[in-house]
Structures are given as structure tokens and as C-alpha cells.
């Protein structure tokens, strides 16, 4: 009980002290009256964007001034207090701006660099035939020990044929591949039949046989080497290769 | 007639006879009479039923009547004091022992039975010590090796130790430069002399060689080694993919197929000139050359006319003639080495590849295998057997391994020779008709192995890189 009362007393005392201090602050002396303003001196800034160009290109020069009555840029002449102007210098140039007013003179500069020997313009990134080929021409997959094009691969072949008929300058090699289970010699013969089978299908769809070469790799150049059906299927294919 | 000759031949020819389990669909292949003979001889009829049902395969003892000569071969001795002699002697002793052991025509008496005193000269032979138990040897090979002024000289004898009056069957002396290779060759020659005399006139194979494909340089090139796996060296340096080496009957040329800029072509290498020589280029995919028995023709597979078919040309590629015309693919032809009148080959005309035979002019095409996946026919030197690689039970749920089989051509009866897992392929016969070399992945990596033609005495020959498609020389 006694302690609580002491707390209250301390709180009230503290509050009082704060109020006293605040009252003292208010009684500080007022500032002296401001001196009469001098005539304002001019300001000026100038920039050029972009600050690097190639010959023949142009850049924008922009400037701002205040408190100036007479603004001029060397080589350009008198200009408005604020403004922009297109410039197209033949060589690197430092523009020099002078702003005069009753308060004095202010200068600003901006430099533009003109690069010589311009780099050749970057090739327009239109995709090459080879890129389009790898994006559009899909391999044809085969069943075990089979060289006839199975039903679900017909659509793939038709899309391939469509691409080839639209890009008549593209020649191709069809590689016949086989999975690892068969015997080396038989697989090479089977791979030959797979490649021929794809070629024949394409020629039936109107692609000239003279654009198509075939080669068998049997199981000599597998795409993967695991011993499971997923990998075997990867390796039973007619693989299209773009020929330059 | 055919069955009788098959049985007689195979029983005398092959000492131990592995017989596949005969399930229902295979029964017609093996005559009832033949089966009964096997099993009566081996086990008696009571065991027939249970063993046929319970085991995948068994080895019977029907060849036990053909007793092999018991031959003792104590280490040869060094005569003289040249320090090099010890190493050469070790090479000689190891090579001779292996050759005789590999031959399959003799039973080598274990060295632990030998008497303490072994002979190095004819005067040192104690006949009774060798002919009586424990060695109980019928024959004794012995001799000595000396090195002097860069030359190695070997004296060797073969003695019939039970014929004390006139024991000498063979006495030979060889001299050559004192190198390991020359010493190994001397051992091969001496072994062949012994095998020729004890094997009923069969020429030995110790000097024969095996061509094969190895990828140990990073490219598949053609290599060659001695028949026992020693002395391996590279033949081709094409930096491409070279496959299917086939040496000519006279050993002067090597045909193979190689990937060229224009595709797979048949290539020809002169083993006399040690360089490539010309062979016609055909275009298309050209594979798996094979020599006719007289070395004048090559059979091979070519897709120049569409699907891969069998063609025959002369040995420079001229006069090309088409032998088969089906939907293919046809590949891996091999000539009957004895008659030259027939060609066996692989065709996928009905689906999975099967073995066929035809006359050398392309007529009379006959299917030899009844099911599964059958490839890589190899005609035995005696003209009677084909060896082949066969996955007999192929299909979904049948993992099936590719094993080496032996088939009698006249009857189409077969026996399975390999049983040890892995993919076994590309069998090739030794000149003596008693051995088969083949490739196997049983260790997890394709390597070259050899065995006796009854499937016993299997032995690995290569260990470096992947080694495939062995082809044994004709001599």
C-alpha cells in the first residue's frame, strides 16, 4: 500500500519536471530578423543522352537554368532558359553552356563521345534452318526387331515431311539405330532397314529421295546404355541429322 | 541314316555331352532312340524322368568309353648356365602345359603324382616310376632347354613308357632367337607334334591365331592374338568402327566391314603386306564378309539393292551376284568350309532372325532353327556342324540369355554348349574342329573366351577393353 502511493508520487513529480522543462524551452530568445536577400545567382545544368553515339546518329542535349536572363551554348547560340535540342556531331564534342543573370554567371558542360569504326550491326536473330530443323524434325521410334513405321509414329513422320517440304534446301541423313539386345551384325542390317523404311515413307510423302541419305549404326552409337525397356526404346529409332 | 551318323559322330567327337532339357515342343527334334541311348548309358531309365523334369540341363557321361591318353609332362630342365634360361624355361613349360591341357585329346597327369627325379635327357628316364601308380602314365613328354650366344635350343621327346624296348614316339630339337615370343612358338610347335600323334592325326592348333575386334584404343579396330590369348596386337588403325574380321583360308588376307564416309563397306587387309588393299565399294550397307573354302570368293550382306541381302563376289569384289531375295534383313553368311557347296546365313524374313542354309548358288533355301532369336552361324571344319548364338526362348516374360549351340546340319538336332550366363555370341571354330572361341558378357563386360566343342574347359582369353567377334584362322 505504502509502496503504491510512493509510485504515484514519483510519477506526478516526473510529469511536473517535464512540463517545467518544456516551459523553459518556449522562453528561448527569438532569431534575429533575416538580412535583405542578395540578388539570386543563376544555376545551370546540362546533360546529353545518350552520351555515346556513332557517326550519323543523334543525341538529345537538355539543359535547365534558373535566375538567368541570357543563356547560350557554344556552337549553338542563344537558347531558352530550359530546353532540349537534337545534336548530331561528327566527332566527340563538349557542349558548353553559359547562363548569365543579375546574380552572376554560371556555366555547365556536357560531353558526347562519338565512337569511330562502328561495330557491324548484330545479326538479326532470325532462327537458322538448322535451328528450325532441330526444333521441328522429330525422330521416329520402332518396336523391337521391327523396321516398319508403327501407327503412333505416322503423325511424327508427317510433321517431319511437312517441314522438309517447306524447307526444300534442307538435306538430311537418317540414322538407323537398334537396342543393345540384338547381335552386332544383325542389328546393323536391321538399322539399315529402319533408316530405309523412314526414307521410303518420306519419299512417299513427296520428299525427293536425292535429299535423303541413310546410314545404319546398329547398336554402335547408342543414345543411352541402361538395360531396361525405356532405354531400349530410346535406341530403337530413325534419327534425323541436318546436313549442311 | 542322318540320325545314326549324328549320334555316332557326336558321341565319338564330343567326350561329354550336355543335353538340354527336352520340353514338349522340343521332343520331335531329338529322336526317342537317341534320348534313350544317352540316358540308359549314363543313368539308367529310372533317372530319365526325374532328371528331365528337374534340371535345365545335365552333363552325361556317355563319352567315358573314349579313354584319353594319360600324359605326364614334367617341367623341362635347363642345361647350361645362361641366366636368361630360367625365364625362357618358365615360358616354355607354361605354354606347353596349357597347349596340351587345352587340346582336349590327352589327360594330363597331375604333377603331384610325379616322381622326385624327372628326366631332362633320354638316359634319365625311369620307365617304371612313370608307368606304375601313382602317375600311371602311358606317355611322358620331357626334355631340356639351353641358351647360348643369343639362341635358345630346345630338345624334347615323347616316350611311350610302357614300351620299354622302343619307347620313342617323338624326338625334336628346335633353335631360335632367345626371346619370349620365339620360345612360346617353340612350345606351340612341340605341343602340336604331340597332339598330332596322340589325337589320332588331328593337327594341333597351338600355332593358330584368333582375329577379333577390340575397342581398347577408343575405336573398334581389328586385333590378333595367339590362340591361347598371348601376344595380342593391333592390326588395323582406321580410327572408325571396324567389325566382323574374317581371315582367308590361306591366312594371307583379312576381310572385314568398316564404317567409311560413304557408309559400311567391305574392307580388305593384306596380312602379307601389312596394309589395306583394294576391294570394290558398293554403296548401301555392306556387312559380314565370309570366305569360300578355296578363298576365291566372298559372301556378304549388302543393302545396295534395297533391304540387306546375301551377295557373292570374287575376292576383290568383282562379279557381284545376288543370292537371296526376300524382305530381309539377311546377314552373316558363312560357307561350308569342307565342301564349299553351301552357305548358312541369318534372315529376319519371318520376324526374329533365324538360321538358314542354301546351296552356294542361292537355291534350296532351308530354315534351320525353329524358334527364338538365332544368329552368328559358324560352319565347323568337318562340314557337319553349325555353331550358332541362340536365344531359344525369346519373348515377353522370357528374359532368355543368348547361348552358344551346336547343330547337326543333316538332322537339325542341337545341343547347348554355354550355360554360364551373359550374352554369348559369335562362335568360331578352331582348325582342329575341337574348340570354339566366342564372345561372352558373363563377367559383365564383353570378352573373348574359348572352350572345347562340347562346352567344357571354358577359358577367358582377353581382359582389356571390350573384345568381340573372334575369328579363328583356318590353320
Image (tube, rainbow, N blue to C red):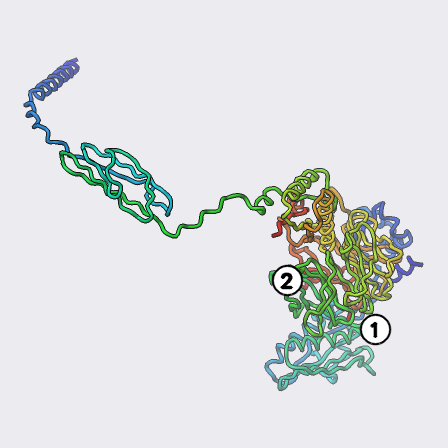
Question: Quick check: can you spot residue B434?
Answer: no
Apparent side of residue A114 relative to residue A218 in the rendered image (left or right) = left
Q: Position of residue B291 (x, y in %)?
A: 79, 65
Res. B410 mark: none
Q: Nearer the viewer, residue A65 or B425?
A: A65
- Residue B258 placement (x, y as % from top left): 69, 61
Residue found at the very far right of the displayed protein: B1
For the point 82% across and 71% down, which residue is it?
A: B202
Tell which residue pokes out farthest to the front in this image: A77
Q: Which residue is mark 1?
A: B201
Residue lying at 71% horizontally and 46% vertically, measured from the top left = A198
Q: Helix, strand, or loop for circle 1?
A: loop
Neighbourhood count class around disc 1 (C-alpha, 10 Å): few under 14, some 14–19, many 20 upward: few
Give residue B67's quadrant in the image: bottom right
Lower sequence index among marks 1 and 2: 1
Residue B237 visible in the shown view? yes
- In which quadrant of the rendered image does the C terminus of chain B lie? bottom right
In percent of width and height, residue A120 lies at 44, 50
Q: Pointers 1 and 2 in contact (CB under 8 A)?
A: no
The nearer-to-camera label among 1 and 2 is 2
Q: Quadrant of residue B149?
A: bottom right
Identify the chain of the residue marked 2, using the numbered disc in the image.
B
Write down the residue under mark 2: B463
- Which chain's residue wears label 1? B
Residue A203 in the figure: left or right of residue A18: right
Asked if residue A129 is positioned above or below residue A41 in the image, the reply reads below
Relative to the observer, which residue lies in front, B297 or B146? B297
Q: Quadrant of the N terminus of chain B?
A: bottom right
Q: Report the Cα–Cα distance between label 1 and label 2.
A: 33 Å
| Residue density around tag 2, few if under 14, some if 14–19, many if 20 or more, within 10 Å | few
Judge left or right: residue A164 versus residue B391. Answer: left
Tag 2 secondary structure: loop
Amino acid at each position: 500500500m505504502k509502496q503504491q502511493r510512493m509510485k504515484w508520487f514519483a510519477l506526478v513529480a516526473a510529469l511536473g519536471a517535464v512540463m517545467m522543462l518544456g516551459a523553459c524551452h518556449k522562453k528561448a530568445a527569438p532569431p534575429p530578423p533575416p538580412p535583405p536577400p542578395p540578388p539570386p545567382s543563376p544555376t545551370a545544368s546540362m546533360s546529353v543522352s545518350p552520351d555515346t553515339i556513332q557517326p550519323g546518329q543523334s543525341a538529345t542535349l537538355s539543359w535547365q537554368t534558373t535566375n538567368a536572363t541570357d543563356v547560350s551554348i557554344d556552337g549553338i547560340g542563344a537558347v531558352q532558359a530550359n530546353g532540349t535540342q537534337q545534336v548530331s556531331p561528327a566527332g566527340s564534342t563538349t557542349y558548353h553552356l553559359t547562363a548569365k543573370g543579375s546574380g552572376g554567371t554560371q556555366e555547365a558542360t556536357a560531353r558526347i563521345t562519338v565512337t569511330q569504326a562502328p561495330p557491324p550491326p548484330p545479326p538479326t536473330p532470325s532462327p537458322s534452318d538448322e535451328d528450325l530443323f532441330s526444333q521441328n524434325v522429330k525422330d521416329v521410334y520402332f518396336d523391337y526387331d521391327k523396321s516398319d513405321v508403327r501407327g503412333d509414329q505416322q503423325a511424327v513422320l508427317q510433321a517431319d515431311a511437312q517441314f522438309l517440304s517447306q524447307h526444300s534446301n534442307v538435306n538430311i541423313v537418317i540414322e538407323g539405330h537398334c537396342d543393345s539386345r540384338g547381335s552386332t551384325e544383325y542389328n546393323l542390317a536391321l538399322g539399315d532397314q529402319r533408316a530405309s523404311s523412314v526414307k521410303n515413307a518420306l519419299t512417299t510423302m513427296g520428299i525427293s529421295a536425292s535429299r535423303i541419305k541413310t546410314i545404319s549404326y546398329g547398336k554402335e552409337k547408342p543414345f543411352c546404355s541402361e538395360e531396361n525397356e525405356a532405354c531400349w526404346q530410346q535406341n530403337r529409332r530413325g534419327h534425323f541429322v541436318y546436313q549442311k | 541314316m542322318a540320325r545314326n551318323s549324328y549320334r555316332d559322330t557326336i558321341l565319338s567327337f564330343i567326350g561329354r555331352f550336355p543335353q538340354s532339357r527336352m520340353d514338349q515342343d522340343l521332343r520331335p527334334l531329338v529322336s526317342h532312340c537317341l534320348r534313350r541311348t544317352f540316358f540308359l548309358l549314363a543313368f539308367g531309365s529310372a533317372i530319365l524322368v526325374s532328371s528331365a523334369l528337374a534340371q535345365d540341363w545335365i552333363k552325361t557321361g556317355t563319352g567315358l568309353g573314349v579313354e584319353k591318353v594319360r600324359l605326364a609332362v614334367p617341367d623341362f630342365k635347363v642345361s647350361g648356365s645362361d641366366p636368361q634360361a630360367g625365364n625362357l624355361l618358365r615360358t616354355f613349360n607354361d605354354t606347353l602345359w596349357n597347349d596340351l591341357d587345352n587340346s582336349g585329346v590327352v589327360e594330363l597327369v597331375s604333377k603331384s603324382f610325379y616322381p622326385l627325379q624327372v628326366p631332362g635327357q633320354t638316359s634319365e628316364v625311369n620307365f617304371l616310376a612313370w608307368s606304375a601308380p601313382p602317375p600311371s602314365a602311358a606317355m611322358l613328354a620331357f626334355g631340356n632347354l639351353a641358351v647360348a650366344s643369343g639362341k635358345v635350343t630346345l630338345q624334347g621327346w615323347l616316350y611311350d613308357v610302357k614300351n620299354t624296348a622302343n619307347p620313342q614316339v617323338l624326338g625334336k630339337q628346335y633353335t631360335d632367337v632367345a626371346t619370349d615370343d620365339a620360345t612360346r612358338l617353340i612350345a606351340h610347335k612341340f605341343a602340336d607334334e604331340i597332339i598330332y600323334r596322340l589325337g589320332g592325326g588331328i593337327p594341333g592348333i597351338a600355332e593358330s591365331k584368333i582375329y577379333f575386334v577390340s575397342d581398347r584404343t577408343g575405336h573398334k579396330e581389328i586385333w590378333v592374338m595367339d590362340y591361347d590369348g598371348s601376344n595380342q596386337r593391333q592390326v588395323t588403325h582406321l580410327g572408325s568402327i571396324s567389325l566382323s574380321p574374317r581371315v582367308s583360308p590361306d591366312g594371307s588376307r583379312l576381310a572385314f566391314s568398316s564404317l567409311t564416309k560413304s557408309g559400311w563397306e567391305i574392307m580388305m587387309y593384306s596380312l602379307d603386306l601389312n596394309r589395306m588393299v583394294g576391294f570394290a565399294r558398293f554403296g548401301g550397307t555392306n556387312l559380314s564378309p565370309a570366305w569360300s573354302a578355296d578363298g576365291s570368293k566372298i559372301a556378304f550382306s549388302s543393302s545396295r539393292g534395297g533391304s540387306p541381302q546375301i551377295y557373292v563376289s570374287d575376292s576383290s569384289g568383282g562379279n557381284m551376284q545376288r543370292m537371296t531375295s526376300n524382305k530381309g534383313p539377311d546377314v552373316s553368311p558363312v560357307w561350308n568350309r569342307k565342301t564349299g557347296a553351301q552357305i548358312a546365313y541369318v534372315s529376319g524374313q519371318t520376324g526374329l532372325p533365324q538360321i538358314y542354309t542354301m546351296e552356294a548358288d542361292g537355291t534350296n533355301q532351308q530354315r534351320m532353327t525353329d524358334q527364338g532369336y538365332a544368329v552368328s552361324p559358324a560352319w565347323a571344319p568337318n562340314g557337319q556342324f553349325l555353331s550358332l548364338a541362340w536365344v531359344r526362348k525369346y519373348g515377353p516374360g522370357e528374359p532368355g540369355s543368348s547361348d552358344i549351340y551346336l547343330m547337326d546340319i543333316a538332322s537339325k538336332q542341337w545341343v547347348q554348349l554355354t550355360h554360364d550366363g551373359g550374352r554369348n555370341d559369335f562362335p568360331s571354330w578352331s582348325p582342329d574342329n575341337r574348340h570354339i572361341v566366342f564372345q561372352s558378357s558373363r563377367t559383365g563386360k564383353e570378352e573373348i573366351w574359348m572352350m572345347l566343342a562340347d562346352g567344357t574347359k571354358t577359358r577367358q582369353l582377353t581382359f582389356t577393353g571390350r573384345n568381340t567377334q573372334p575369328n579363328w584362322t583356318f590353320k
